Amino acid sequence: MIDVEPLIRDELELLAPSEHVKRDWADALRRSGARGTRTPRRVALAAALAAAIAAGLAVLPGRIGDHRVNVLDAALAAISRGPVLHAVLVVDASETWRGPSGHPTFATLDLATGAQRPVRQTTEIWFDAQRHRLHQLSRVDGGVVADALQTPTLLRDSWRLRDLPGSRPAIDPALQAALRGYRAALRSGTARVAARAHFRGRPVIWIRFRGAAGTSQEVGVAPMTFRPLFLRAVCPRCTAAPPTYTIRRLEGVRRADANFRLPPRAPAFFGRYANQEVRAIDPSQASRLLGAHALWAGRSVAGLPLSLTQFVNASQHSRLPIRKGNAVGRSYGIRLLYNVDVQANGGWRVPAGRRSVSIVETTDFRFGIGSFAGFRLRFPTTLARAPIPRWPSVALSAFDPHHWTLQTKRGRLYVEIGAPTRGLAVAVAKALRPVP
Amino acid sequence: MVVFRDRRLSEIEWLYEEHLDRFVQVARAITGDRERALEAVQDAFAGVIRARRGFRGDAPLEAYVWRAVVNAARKATRRPLVEVRELHDGPADEMDPPAAAAELAPRIAALPERQRLVVFLRYYADLDYGTIATVAGIEVGTVGPTLASAHRALRRALEQEVNR
């Protein structure tokens, strides 16, 4: 069944666009025949109120997004005349990854309420075709995960330690067409109508563009207004469908309004060489060694016995060979392993087909204890590159349906649980309590 | 501290400053014309200011002002309620007519007047059912079914287009 509410909201904006109307209270008073009742102070108050409203509108992108971007500006995007293409695209983060079994599963779950939501990736693009500049900024659940500027002389990517030589950037022809308009693209023969369909609750015309490398992209536009709604690559042979982006904003803007600022450089972690020393401990020692209240799921959880508790002493070093003297940073972690086989040398293994659970805890995300620093960003991230949610919210990730990772921050501790099923991972999280 | 000599007038002024954009938007949807909408809203506020001492307070002041704006906009309407405009220049011959007709604007314009007004008040003004009932002059219990009827009509039209 079609959900008509969002469609109604969009169409109403076309009928009577929202706008900031100039206030003229004095005129209303004059028409009413009432004598002016304003004191100078009230005039100042009203002016301040109007200024505050205007300022609020200027700095609240969410509000602007709700009222302008989705409707009026987006509707007019095809005839925007600014020389810089500006696009804001949103996609379910799991669609941008490819696991061995297709797309992975990424979600944020609130353990208190049971509410679950997908992880969203937003990509913002500024592209100046005449001056050959491209800036791409990607966020996952609000955290900046990629920030790259490409010019003919320089490529600065926020996660690289060094700049690379520049080159002339290119961008999807499907997005570029926004500057000239999709009707123009159809008329000129650079695009063709691929399909008329019903997609995510609304009628859409898919317009197909051929890319330079023989690939194709499609833009889904609203049938009458040609307002761009969706963007996707075309890949009939792909085992997992390429992501479909929802177009939040697509317009031509003035150069003065574009963002071509040089991105910040990648954070330099402490040292180039990492080391971890691991030893078995008794669970009762965990809090003292960790320097924080360690958590566990008890002597057994879901019928799986606690087999091994390990203390991880992690350090970063400036040079080889690794010695105490050249350590530039140090942190500690705890690893609890349930239902594994412990070997004589202190190692462990999981026999094929056996269910096991791991719990990893640390107070500093940067030392490779758990997967919190896997993307070398300035903040701890989930496997979906989203910021680590705070307890009772947890991040759930599964690249493989038989291995789930749950991550959260509880108090000072970053906690990561590995389990063969989503249900078991959640059950372990709910069973977490301080080690006595 | 600011001392208001006329509390009711100050409340009306606050509504004007805070919500003028929404008043104009609804008036524009009703009149189909921006300038007429601006005139209607200014006239409506002038009327509310004149009659403020007679306001009994048996309904929220905001609903009272909304009713004045809707009435002024209706009065200012001398042509069809909604004018549907083509936003892009250039021929539309790339599209076949059924696909083009799938857009909602003409469907909204074709709704019965009461349904249309309730849709405008709900979606432009974000008013609650009680205020909508006061403004539209209907029972509170009628607002939900009226909106549902509008949704049903629009959904049916869309599904017909999609299945065509």
Image (tube, grey):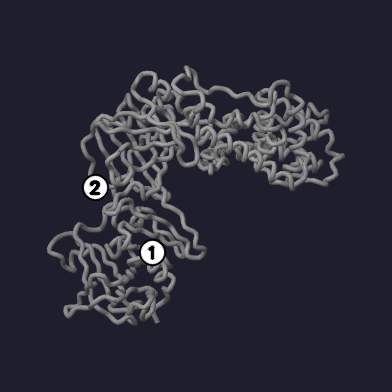
Residue position for label 2: A161
Whether labels 1 and 2 belong to a single chain: the reply is yes
Mark 1 residue type: Arg
Q: Quadrant of residue A250?
A: top left
State left or right for residue A17 relative to residue A266: right
State left or right for residue A143 relative to residue B58: left
Q: Residues within 10 Å of mark 2 (few under 14, many from 20)?
A: few
State left or right for residue B8 relative to residue A382: right
Q: Quadrant of residue B42?
A: top right
Q: Is residue A116 visible?
A: yes
Residues B111 and A323: in front is B111
Number of numbered discs on residues: 2
Residues A121 and B9: in front is A121
Eyeballing the image, is A295 above or below A250?
A: below
Residue A3 point in image, percent of width and height: 55, 43
Eyeballing the image, is A305 above or below A220?
A: below
Residue position for label 1: A422
Give the position of the C terminus of chain A as an image quadrant.
Answer: bottom left
Mark 2 residue type: Leu
Residue A170 point in image, percent of width and height: 29, 31
Eyeballing the image, is A296 above or below B124?
A: below
